[in-house]
Amino acid sequence: MPSISYLLARLLQIIPTFLLVMVFIFLLVRMLPGDPAIAMAEAKATDAQVEQIRHNLGLDRPLPVQFVIFVKNTVTGDLGRSIMLKAPVTEVILDRLPTTIFLALYSVVLAVFLAGPLAFLAAVRVNSATDVVIRSVFQIGLSMPVFYIGLVLLTVLAAQLRWFPVGGYGTGFLDNLHHLILPALSVALYTSAIILRNLRASLIEVLDADYVQFARSKGLSTRIIMTRHVLRNALVSTVTLLGLSIGNLMSGTLVTETVFAIPGVGRLMLEAIFARDYPLIQGLTLTFAVLVSVVFLLTDIVQSLLDPRLRKA
Amino acid sequence: MKRLLPFLLGAALGLSAATSALAIERGGAMSFARYDDSAVIDPVWADRNPDLWMITSLYETLLRNGADGSIEPGLAESYEVSGDGKSISLKLRDGLKFSDGSAITGDDVVFSLDRARNPDGPWAGLLGSVEKVTAEGGKITLSLKQPDPTIPSILATFNTGIVSKVAFEKAAGANDQEKAKAYFDNNPVTSGPFTMKSRVAGSSMSFARNPNYWRQGKDGKSLPYLDEVDFVVIPDDATRILKLQAGEVDVAEFIPFARVGELRGDANLKMELFPSTRIIYAPINTRDTRKDGSKNPLADIKVRQALNYATDKNMLIKLVTFDTGKPMTSLMSAATQLHYGPEPLYPYNPEKAKQLLAEAGIDGGLDITFTTLAGSADDATLFTALQQMWAPLGVNLKVEQVDNPTRGAKNRSGEFDIHTYGWANDVNDPAQVTGWLGYYKQRQAVGTGWNNAEFNTLFEASNSEVDQAKRKDEYKRMQEIYAENAPLLFLYETPFAVAVSKSIEDYVQTPLGANDFSAAWRAK
């Protein structure tokens, strides 16, 4: 088990990350071309109305003052009110977040179940026909943009064959699983391609390592060799990759949730950007930062479980 | 069974004869795929189209827009403008009820109109001339600061929808805006054809029939015919169409023009192109000098006219709208009240364009920057087509791609030559679009800097002109002046493209964009 001090140190490292993220978000929104007040006021507004919006947003105050207010509000959980949805940002995000997390976990589980066994098969039979077929199929998955995979799946499996609903989220756990299978699959196809490539390579490397050869010569059973020696060592880099791809997956939800009409934070981000809903954009960016940090933290913990040498780092 | 068959057959025939006589069938639900979700459907605070275009389904106005755009009675059975134009009185119908069964009274009307005048609300300006609203029983009086011929139209506009005073005041919230949100979120009491049944933010929404709605259908019973309208939010165009083709929804709105032709060929669908007040145009900077201090050739009316003549609108309509658009015939769309435009403006005539440029003394070529929206395929097509159309005139058209807020900022500061823009009316009165496009004091005539004394005077006069015939003449003259002066590149009008299942009848999207389900019905 990783020690308490390791966990604590890892948690403390997150604080400067968040501070940097906050500075970044704050400046980014204000550095965008065009005046946010003009963007929000729509063309029809008079100059006086634009000025009013600027005042309401506090944009007429000095930058450092705006930053202090921003940090103070954020720390107290007050992310402001969404201009587009006319509701508190925190409330809106908490309402949509579970959907996105559900979709992300669903995709990861599907990806692992797809890639894991196939990577094994490919690694054990390196350069055989099976290996070549598995690699080629997944190479295609890797080369196609997620939204395109999504549209193909929707057109064939939902609109033509009518096996699955065209988009939406559904109500209740089983209905959610049913509704989200195509979006989860289209994301999983991409993620599993990455995992497969990496896992296959590490498995081949580990299978060839001296200690595995030694274990074999000791007469250990294949099952024990695989679980205790091969998998554990091959998984270290795959877990890192999985962690990283969850980060990517979060940004991928922008597209997936739009194509599949899923009411999650990804689509919300896209809508907020189009509506120039600055409080919401800030809140969502922060949420994504928190989520990715948590995933990275979990990745580190899992890695340190797999490889005790990392606990000292 | 054999003996039953003739009976069933007879019954079925009898039934179909009965329905064809009535033509309309009651009941059932209609499902509707939307491009975006509603956040707050409130007459006063709504400011996005997905909210605005649903308001009249929930909140009835005192007056209504008729199918031909004329003003018809609504909750008020009649209205009268006083001789001096400074007061309007309306009479509420007897026995009106909200969805919860409580009576719609003069108090509710005063409350709703006072809310609509809240200066913080985005639409308060529409009632700017109103000094006071009072009610005596069912008689409502609006006292005006000055005569305002637009008021009847405004009383038929979403922002004056009637809400229940008692129910609204019970809603939680520190101010009117927060109350509006809370009211909407908790199945509000409504006066329109529908009530809110349920809603999942970002995903779906259901309207149920308001049993107390006042208007009657063709069968002599109260509207609406449908029991329910169920909405699903599907932002992606391709997915929305797939959902319709898979039979999971009955209607899909905002069909991209590129796919209209394909859906016309679908035997299960009707491809509707509802006339709209939407126009696509390009403001031209008419100031004598550009922002950088250089002389602005576009300040010359002849150069602006030349560019208009050198623009083949029909070609642009084909390229961008896949032949669904129409050329502009006036500054406002043909579906706007008091529109005057007997024929398309500046029909394609490259010879005349050349001649006008020569008269303007332009012989050494002309450098013009065309500002477009980055990422917009339509704008990119427009630019490349214009570049080719204008090149023979010696116009060197350069492109500058910006994002939407930057385009807005440039429009406000006058830092552009020509840029793309679009507009749709919110109100069934020409004053809104005319003020926006032509009146200098409002927004420098859509940022063009065009300042025409005669036009400005006519616009001011028309805003307090009580004589309808005179007002019509003023509008005719304004549209003539505007067309001749060409502060815009006049492009085209576009319709609302909605694909509807053949089993749904009489769904309408109005020229202002509002979704009207009140007389829609489902054939079983």
Image (cartoon, rainbow, N blue to C red):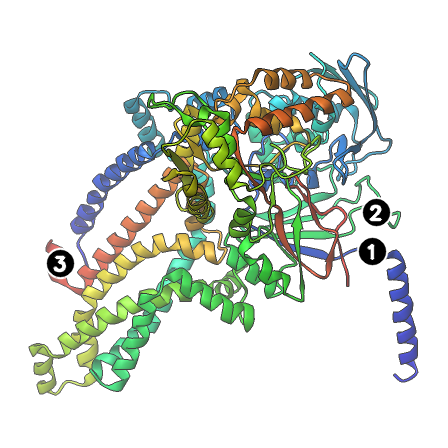
The chain letter for the residue carrying disc 2 is B
Residues marked 1 and 2 touching at CB (< 8 Å): yes
Which residue type does callout 1 highlight? Ile
Residues marked 3 and 2 touching at CB (< 8 Å): no
Q: Is residue B20 left or right of residue B87?
A: right
Between B25 and B381, the residue placed more toward the observer is B381
Q: Quadrant of residue B66?
A: top right
Q: Is residue B397 left or right of residue B187?
A: left
Q: Report the residue marked by disc 1.
A: B24
Q: Position of residue A273 (x, y in %)?
A: 41, 41
Q: How many residues crowd around disc 3 within 10 Å: few (fewer than 14), some, or many (20 or more)? A: some
**Callout 3 and callout 2 share a chain:** no
Secondary element under disc 1, as helix, strand or loop, is loop
Q: Quadrant of residue A282?
A: top left
Between B326 and A98, the residue placed more toward the observer is B326
Which residue type does callout 2 highlight? Gly
Q: Report the residue marked by disc 3.
A: A310
Q: Position of residue B56 (x, y in %)?
A: 69, 38
Q: How many residues crowd around disc 2 within 10 Å: few (fewer than 14), some, or many (20 or more)? A: some
Frontmost of labels 1 and 3 is 1
Q: Report the residue marked by disc 2.
A: B217
Which residue is at a point 49% across and 33% down the rendered structure image? B355
Image height of B125 relative to B146, above or below: below
Q: Is residue A122 visible?
A: yes
Secondary element under disc 3, as helix, strand or loop, is helix
Between A219 and A282, the residue placed more toward the observer is A282
Secondary element under disc 2, as helix, strand or loop, is loop
Choose the circle earlier in sequence order: 1 or 2: 1
Which residue is at a point 25% across and 37% down the rendered structure image? A19
